[in-house]
Amino acid sequence: MAKQVSELSVPVPWGEIRGKVWGPDHGRPVLCLHGWADNCGTFNTLIPLLPKECKYVALDLPGHGLSSHRPPGVFYSHSEYVADVRRVVDALQLKKCSIIGHSMGGEIAGLFSALYPEMVDALVLLDAFGFLPTDSTEISKVMRQGIDEMLRFENKKEEKKRVYTYKTAVGRLSAANPSLSEQSVHILLERGLVQVEGGFVFSRDVRVNFKNIVRLSLDLSLEMQSRIQASVLVVLAEGGFDRMLSEPAQSKFTSTLLQRLQDGNGGDCTRRPSRSSE
């Protein structure tokens, strides 16, 4: 499969969505959506292990990897990412596909599968639940935080991006993500750095760090989940996504989401905890 890898570029109104494609041109289409602050390189070591007859389309979500950043003043939210996925699906003329989503990519995949259930035949959620509800009493606070972060950013004087040597960039990413293996660091930096005069700058848009201001309550998440027609596989990692839940009640919410999946609302669910390597 190594010889069947090509670069993807889909024009969008503000630039392009980039990515990588593995497998035969007419293979069963499988979209691969990475997690927050990652890029499509996160699938580099997984895809060669999957069925060879499929065509895997791994995206750099806007603001990540080599994809264009959103225009000034525009927020990054899961609903915007769903629209991006639909843009790619339309550009590739796909009537139906499967989706593999990791972490944030799993939430985007879940929302896409709920809004366009006729277009998704199978959904694999890697260390994700398809939705990550926010307590209704917390939504206004989170929305305000995200808006304030954007406005503070816009009011700051424009700063030049810091230029790194490749070695110092490796050190920075490793320090910020101590669970990443050395191999994973180098894979992510293949698309996570852009060469400039004097060295490299990180390609990721700083605005992806701001709070997502589009939030779903538990009730709305369950209603959306019930619209999914695809079969669903949930794979959770030991010491993975669960330990990152920071907002009140999210652990309880995720248990409810998994139970509904196992009860058949939205597809079949198999829980397979595995040790996280990243």
Image (cartoon, rainbow, N blue to C red):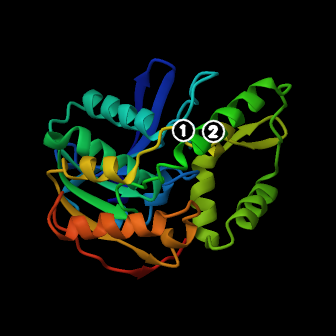
Rounded to the nearest whole Å, what is the CA distance between mark 1 and mark 2? 6 Å
Q: Residue at x 55, y 71 (%)?
A: 278
Say which residue appears at 48% left-offset and 63% top-offset.
250
In the foreground, 120 or 148: 148
Q: Badge 1 is on which residue?
A: 213
Secondary element type, mark 1: loop
On the image, the x and y values in percent for residue 218 come to 37, 54
Q: Quadrant of residue 207?
A: top right
Residue at the spot 16% in from the left edge and 54% down from the top edge: 230
Q: In the rendered image of this protein, does residue 229 appear above or below residue 253?
A: above
Tell me the kind of residue under disc 2: Gly
Total labels: the figure holds: 2
Residue 148 in the image: x percent, y percent? 70, 34
Q: Callout 2: helix, strand or loop?
A: helix
**Residue 49 visible in this rendered orientation of the protein:** no
Contact between marks 1 and 2 (CB within 8 A): the answer is yes
Residue receiving disc 2: 146
Disc 2 packing (10 Å; few <14; some 14–19; many ≥20): some
Q: How crowded is mark 1: few (under 14 residues within 10 Å), some or many (20 or more)?
A: some
